[in-house]
Image (cartoon, helix red, strand yellow):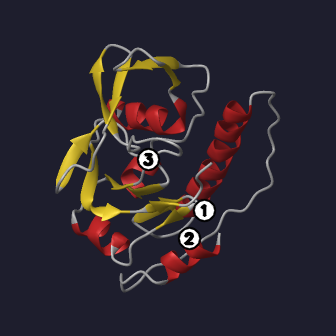
Amino acid sequence: MPRCYNSLLEQDYPNFLVSVVAKRPVFQHSDTTKLKYLNCVDNRNEARRMFLGSDSDYCLFVDSDIVLPKNALSLLMSHGKDVMGGWYQEINSDRWVAGRWIADNTFFNFRQIQPSVVKTDVVGMGCALVSRKVLEQVSFKPAIDVILKDESGVSLILGECGAFGNDVAEMGFNLYMDGSVVCEHLIRN
C-alpha cells in the first residue's frame, strides 16, 4: 500500500535499505484465516532469507497495511535489543498485537499501549525490529493448528507472531515493545 511504502521512505534513520517481498500466494486452504497465516509466513521467511544474504545487523519487518511514524526505525534501533516491536491494534479489535502468557496456554493481549519500553512475550511482526543473531537461529512458522485461550476463555490461533515469540524466548532472547512507536493499521473491516 502506498502509505506504508511512503512511511518507510520517510524514516529519519540515516542509513537503511528497503527490500520489498511481493510474492503471489503459494498456499491454498479452505479457511481464509489459516490461508493468510500460511502465505504471510512464506513471505516472512523469504524476507528473512534475503536479509541473511545481506551484511545488515537488523531487519525491520513491516506489513503492507502498517504506516510507521517517521521516527520508528530510529527509536526501535536506539534500544539495541534483539527484538523490539512497535504498537498497532489488531484488525477489528481493541487489542494491541503484543501481550504476555498469563497461564498455561492462556494469553493476554495488551488493551492499551504500555509506556516506555516493556518486556513482552509476543510482538506483532507487522512492525518488528529483529537482530541478525535472532534471525540466524529462528525462522517463521504458521502455527495455525495451535489453539490457545485468551483471558476470557475465547479460543485463538497461536499464529506466526506467537510462534515466533515462543521460539525466540526458547533460544534465550527477550522481546520488547517501545511505547513511543505507535503505528497505524490501515485495514479495518
Q: Horizontal and vertical percent for residue 49?
A: 60, 55
The label shown at residue 4 is 2
Please say if the residues under marks 1 and 2 sit with CB atoms less than 8 Å apart. yes
Residue assigned mark 1: 64
Q: Horizontal and vertical percent for residue 20?
A: 64, 68
Amino acid on which disc 2 is placed = Cys
Amino acid on which disc 1 is placed = Ser
Taking 124 as reference, is 83 left or right?
A: left
Which residue is at 61% across, 26% downward?
144
Mark 2 neighbour class, 10 Å CA radius: few under 14, some 14 to 19, many 20 or more: some
Secondary structure beneath dot 2 equals: helix
Q: How many discs mark residues in the rendered view? A: 3
Mark 1 neighbour class, 10 Å CA radius: few under 14, some 14 to 19, many 20 or more: some
Mark 3 neighbour class, 10 Å CA radius: few under 14, some 14 to 19, many 20 or more: many
* Alpha carbons under labels 1 and 3: distance apart: 13 Å
Q: Check the image and name the residue furthest to the left.
A: 116
- Residue 17 visible (yes or no): no
The label shown at residue 160 is none
Q: Earlier in the sequence, mark 2 or mark 3?
A: 2
- Residue 173 visible (yes or no): yes
Which residue is at 63% across, 48% downward?
189
Secondary structure beneath dot 3 equals: loop
Secondary structure beneath dot 1 equals: loop
* Alpha carbons under labels 1 and 2: distance apart: 6 Å
Q: Horizontal and vertical percent for residue 104?
A: 33, 13
Q: Quadrant of residue 12?
A: bottom left
Q: Earlier in the sequence, mark 1 or mark 2?
A: 2
Taking 189 as reference, is 90 left or right?
A: left
Q: Horizontal and vertical percent for residue 16?
A: 45, 79
Residue assigned mark 3: 124
Q: Earlier in the sequence, mark 1 or mark 3?
A: 1
Taking 82 as reference, is 161 left or right?
A: right
